[in-house]
């Protein structure tokens, strides 16, 4: 009979132990799976909550600016940290153009040529060091000529005041320099007024009076030979009265290009008188063309009967009026107009520059005035003039309104012949008549030319002397 008691049957006891262990493992596995499922579910819930919270922050207008600022700061820190760490290792090259070249030499004794005024520097090194050099800008290039005398030398250019942490290459790195000894020559002083566009037109500048009329110029011999003149530059901007100033001196060659040289002294004291010559003159009308429909000007009323003109005194002495140009072909009835005054040659300014005119017209008539005297002008050689048939007068037709024509007499009309280009002998000359712009009438000569015999009295006197000598022999 079988024994089923596990305590007495070792095989049975071992099977039950294994079965119990398996059940225990199975129960433990279920717990682990359940635990993992719980954790996983919790994680999913956490992620969904976090995602929902981030969405509320990112897409909420209240927090959008804060989020943008935080991201920008984060990005800035990241980039700068990266750039800083990289730049400490990256090599860089930077070109610096137009670095001024300075010279160490005795400028009182020698003149230097062939040296460039600027050089290009190529700076090489770590990026941070190169960037530091770019921001400093207190560097230069030096050519050391101290101890050298007259002659031509190949001189090395040296970088100065660059950081020791960078390498510097120069272009050019050398220069062929010529050193010449300076000599001194004396020049006469001339002048130029500068900034004349800033001087009011009503003012006239007198001749400058200099403290010294000669200056010493020091330079190499060939440089001195190229100097044509030395000028004092007198600044006249804004001047309204007599003034004194220290004018800067500049040497120029024949083409007017400045020449670099030592001028001793470099300035000169100058006095300049400032005047404003002026004169009041009447306004006259110069008609261009003919007034249509048988009309003529009866009178013109100006809002200013005279104007003030500004010019050199020599110009003022020759002027007794100023003119307004008027197109007569457009005058068909009484009219008012605003017209600019023609600026005479040499006149700097007119005040006022324009005038109002009230023009009155009337019916035109004409009359002939006889016995108008003939005058000779520009007889600088003092020739004798004899007219054919001893004619000394002509007739002139006067055209205008009745009132204006009636005012004209023979003495008001000036007829003349111009002897400027005449030579001795018999010839035909043209007669001319002055048109009086103040009376608004027109003069017409009834005789356009005249036959004259021109003789030279000096030759006649010589001939008379010869005849007298011959008669006595």
Image (cartoon, helix red, strand yellow):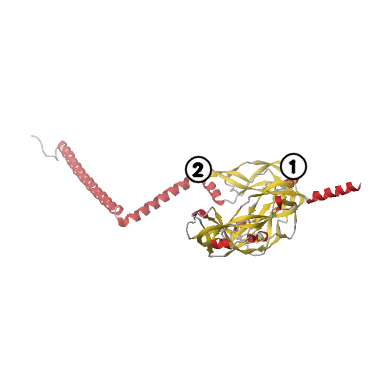
Taking the spot 39% from the left edge, 51% from the top edge, the residue there is 74
Image-quadrant location for residue 61: bottom left
Q: Is residue 111 left or right of residue 462?
A: left
The front one of 137 and 439 is 439
What is the x, y in percent for residue 26? Answer: 19, 41
Where does label 1 land, which residue? 151
Q: Nearer the viewer, residue 76 or 456?
A: 456
CA gap, disc 2 and disc 1: 46 Å
What residue is shown at x 34% (from left), y 55% (from top)? Answer: 65
Specify the quadrant that holds the N terminus.
Answer: top left
Sequence order check, earlier mark of 2 and 1: 2
Q: Residue at x 84, y 49 (%)?
A: 464
Q: Is residue 147 visible?
A: no
Determine whether the residue tagged by mark 2 lies in a helix, strand or loop.
Answer: loop
Q: Where is residue 22 drawn, in percent x and y?
A: 18, 40
- Residue 186 horizontal/vertical position (percent): 77, 52
Q: Residues within 10 Å of mark 2 (few under 14, many from 20)?
A: few
Out of 99 and 261, give the one closest to the viewer.
261
**Looking at the picture, how far across and down is residue 429, in whole percent?**
67, 48
In the image, taking residue 23 as reference, residue 280 lies left or right, namely right
Dot label at residue 90 = 2
The vertical placement of 17 against 368, above or below, is above
Whether pointer 2 and pointer 1 mark residues with C-beta atoms closer than 8 Å, the reply is no
Task: Name the front one of labels 2 and 1.
Answer: 1
Secondary structure under tag 1 reads strand
């Amino acid at each position: 009979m079988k024994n089923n008691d596990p305590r007495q049957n070792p095989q049975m006891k071992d099977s039950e132990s294994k079965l119990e262990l398996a059940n225990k493992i199975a129960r433990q596995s279920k717990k682990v799976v359940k635990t993992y499922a719980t954790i996983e579910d919790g994680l999913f819930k956490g992620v969904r909550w976090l995602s929902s919270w981030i969405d509320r922050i990112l897409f909420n207008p209240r927090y959008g600016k804060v989020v943008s600022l935080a991201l920008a700061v984060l990005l800035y820190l990241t980039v700068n940290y990266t750039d800083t760490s990289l730049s400490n290792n990256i090599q860089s090259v930077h070109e610096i153009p137009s670095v001024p070249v300075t010279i160490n030499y005795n400028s009182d004794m020698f003149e230097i040529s062939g040296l460039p005024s600027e050089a290009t520097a190529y700076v090489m090194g770590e990026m941070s060091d190169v960037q530091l050099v770019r921001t400093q800008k207190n560097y230069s290039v030096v050519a050391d000529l101290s101890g050298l005398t007259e002659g031509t030398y190949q001189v090395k250019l040296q970088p100065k005041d660059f950081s020791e942490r960078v390498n510097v290459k120069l272009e050019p790195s050398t220069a062929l320099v010529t050193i010449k000894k300076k000599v001194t020559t004396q020049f006469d002083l001339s002048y130029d007024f500068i900034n004349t566009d800033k001087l009011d037109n009503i003012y006239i500048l007198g001749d400058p009076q200099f403290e010294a009329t000669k200056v010493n110029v020091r330079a190499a011999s060939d440089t001195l030979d190229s100097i044509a003149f030395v000028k004092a530059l007198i600044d006249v901007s804004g001047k309204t009265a007599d003034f004194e100033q220290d004018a800067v001196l500049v040497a120029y060659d024949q083409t007017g290009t400045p020449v670099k040289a030592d001028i001793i002294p470099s300035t000169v004291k100058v006095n300049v008188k400032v005047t404003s010559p002026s004169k009041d003159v009447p306004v006259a009308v110069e008609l261009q063309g003919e007034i249509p429909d048988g009309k003529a000007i009866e009178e013109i009323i100006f809002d200013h009967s005279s104007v003030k003109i500004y010019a050199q005194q020599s110009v003022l002495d020759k002027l007794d009026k100023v003119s307004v140009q008027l197109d007569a072909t457009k005058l068909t009835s009484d009219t008012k107009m605003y017209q600019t005054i023609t600026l005479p040659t040499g006149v700097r300014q007119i005040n006022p520059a324009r005038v109002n005119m009230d023009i009155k017209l009337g019916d035109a008539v004409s009359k002939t005035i006889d016995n108008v005297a003939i005058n000779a002008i520009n007889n600088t050689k003092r020739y004798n003039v004899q007219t054919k048939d001893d004619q000394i007068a002509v007739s002139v037709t006067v055209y205008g309104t009745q009132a204006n024509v009636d005012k004209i007499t023979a003495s008001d009309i000036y007829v003349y012949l111009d002897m400027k280009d005449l030579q001795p002998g018999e010839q035909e000359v043209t007669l001319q008549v002055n048109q009086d712009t103040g009376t608004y009438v027109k003069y017409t000569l009834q005789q356009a030319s005249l036959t004259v015999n021109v003789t030279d009295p000096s030759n006649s006197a010589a001939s008379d002397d010869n005849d007298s000598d011959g008669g006595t022999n």
